[in-house]
Image: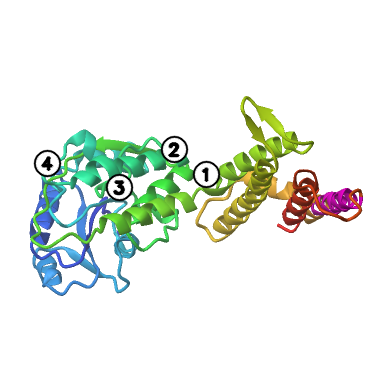
Amino acid sequence: MADGLELTILMPCLNEAETLAVCIGKAQAFLSRTGVAGEVLIADNGSTDGSIEIALRCGARIVSVSERGYGAALAAGIAAASGRFVIMGDADDSYDFSRLDAFLEQLRDGADLVMGNRFAGGIAPGAMPWHHRYIGNPVLSFVGRLLFQTSVRDFHCGLRGFSRDAVLALTLRTMGMEFASEMVVKATLAQLDIREVPTTLDKDGRSRPPHLRSFRDGWRHLRFLLLFSPRWLFLYPGVALLCLGLVVGGVLLAGPVRLGGVTFDIHTFLVAALCVIVGVQSIAFAVIGRRFASRYGFIPRSDQYDRLLEGLSLERILLVAVVLMVVGAGALLWGVSEWAARDYGPLNPSSTMRPVILATTALVAAFS
């Protein structure tokens, strides 16, 4: 990294010939007005419309990125940046690169990541589709805050600044639009200093459709948030199902229960058994998924999780499995005895199916 440069203004680019010169000009005007030692860096993702020539003519530096994707372009640009700080934004003239003062001020004050908040700063008419403004962005931002306990209100604002070293240490891996979510999530999990500043969003200056695809990229963001939080995707639902199944199954094990005008019998008992099986498997998925994700660097290591794994030794897991097998075998003997009591004749489903369901549930859980 070159000495003396404080700021890199980074723009991912894929065929932005209509607006690139304007964006570069505004960024250079900001550097000139504030006297900041900086550069304008264009991470070109394979443009064929003359964007590279425009950027060079305007005095920007180019880094060519062969792997397609918003995240791929930004990751390469961050790695190639010469500034201590990086402020990134789209090259479609929807963000005003001449007004980055608040971002730089927060970075100089010690912030690791400074997010723009378009809802606080103002969204111009026509700048954001209604389903993005009132459904997509609010819902995904709410999910992100719920799952990761972050204060960020606008998860997907494309204008954001950060310490280059701090973000490189996060080892961001996604190559698509979900790169934006990954940055916020990993910064939150790493307990970095994250702040928000109001920013404006104008209607972009392109005549072609945007690269963003609402439902495809919205699903990729949601999928990333869920997979990055196996507690909410698997663990909490699994624990809830397991507890529900154990309570309802325990009540119905002795026989039917009548509440008001409704009788809960063998069919409810079967559903409770299903809840137990799905709950056990969901909890197992949460443990395995968390271990896999932390091992390969997708999720930071957790001392609490490591202590849990230490408690779940192979010997203890096998002991629980053996106990469940014994319970299952005992329940099968119970069922056979019920049948024998009828001289192996016609069965009473209400009484005979209970031990069979219990045996099946215990054996399936043991082998899970």
Secondary structure under tag 3 reads loop
Spot occupied by residue 200 in the image (x, y as percentages of width and height): 16, 40
Closer to us: 331 or 341: 341
Q: Rounded to the nearest whole Å, what is the CA distance between mark 4 and mark 1?
A: 36 Å
Determine the secondary structure under disc 2.
Answer: helix
**Hey, what amino acid is under mark 1?**
Trp
CB-based contact (under 8 Å), mark 3 and mark 4: no
Distance between the alpha carbons at the discs numbered 3 and 1: 21 Å
Residue drawn at x 23%, y 36% is: 119
Residue at 26% across, 36% down: 197
| Residue placed under numbered mark 3 in the picture | 156
* Place of residue 126 in the rendered image (x, y in percent of width and height, measured from the top left): 11, 46
Quarter of image, res 366: bottom right
Tell me what residue is drawn at x 68 percent, y 36 percent: 248
- CA distance for labels 3 and 2: 15 Å
Estimate the spatial distance between the alpha carbons at disc 3 and disc 4, rounded to whole Å. Answer: 17 Å
Badge 3 or badge 4: first in the primary sequence: 4
Q: Of label 2 and label 1, which has the lower sequence position?
A: 2
Q: Specify the amino acid type for callout 2.
A: Leu
Is residue 337 covered in magenta? yes
The residue wearing badge 2 is 146
How far is disc 2 from disc 1 in space, using C-alphas? 10 Å
Which residue is identified by label 4? 124
| Residue labelled with disc 1 | 232
Residue 3 appears in the picture as rendered = no
Q: Secondary structure at mark 1?
A: helix
Instruction: Give, as a single range, the part of the protein colored magenta.
Output: 321-340
Marks 3 and 2 close (CB-CB < 8 Å): no
Mark 3 crowdedness (10 Å alpha carbons): few <14, some 14-19, many ≥20: many
Q: Are marks 2 and 1 in contact (CB under 8 Å)?
A: yes
Instruction: Say how the picture is coloured.
Output: rainbow
